[in-house]
Amino acid sequence: MHAQPNNPLHGITLENVVTQLVDHYGWRELAQIVKINCFRSDPSIKSSLKFLRKTQWARDEVEDLYITTFTDSIPKPRSLSAKNELEAQAVTPKKGHKKSSAASHSKSKIKADPWANFKG
């Protein structure tokens, strides 16, 4: 087996990852963090492993949570980092552009009722 110094999951089985997360968070909190049914409905290690082995996006989220929870060198989680980067781009104005005064005051205004013009 090759050494993988940059892989914090090297040598850790998926079963160990799930077991440690359940011990740390419990099923209820784990299901709130990673929104997958195998953590919500009649959860077990066995059913979770079966689902995670077949569903790469869910496995990525669980592995990222493990890394952020249990390692000292915390890389950005794959699933969360992309989402956070998009949110940061949407919120952060580009250099040289100022927010308009209407945009800066929009939080203080009351939003219009989206159903006001509905004809049902």
Image: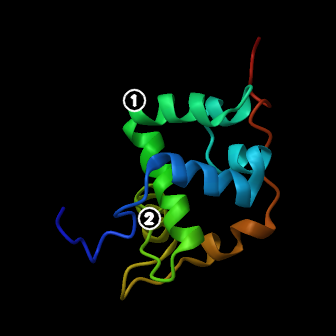
Q: Quadrant of residue 45?
A: top right
Amino acid type, residue under disc 2 in the picture:
Ser
Q: Is residue 10 left or right of residue 39?
A: left
Mark on residue 74? none
- Residue situated in front as seen by the camera: 63 or 106: 63
Q: Are marks 2 and 1 in contact (CB under 8 Å)?
A: no
Mark 2 or 1, closer to the camera? 1
Q: Earlier in the sequence, mark 2 or mark 1?
A: 1
Residue extending farthest bottom = 96
Q: Is residue 108 left or right of residue 58?
A: right
Q: Choose between 82 and 98: the one closer to the eye.
A: 82
Q: Position of residue 25 (x, y in %)?
A: 74, 57
Residue 99 position (above or below residue 76) = below
Where disc 1 sits, the SS reads helix
Where residue 112 sits: x, y (%)? Answer: 78, 46
Residue at position x 53%, y 53% in the image: 16
Whether residue 22 is situated above or below residue 93 in the rendered picture: above
Q: Residue at x 58, y 31 (%)?
A: 46
Tell me which residue sits at (63%, 71%) in the image. 102
- Left/right of residue 39 with respect to residue 51 in the rendered view: right
Residue at the left extreme, as displayed: 2
Amino acid beneath label 1: Lys
For label 2, the residue is 81
For label 1, the residue is 54
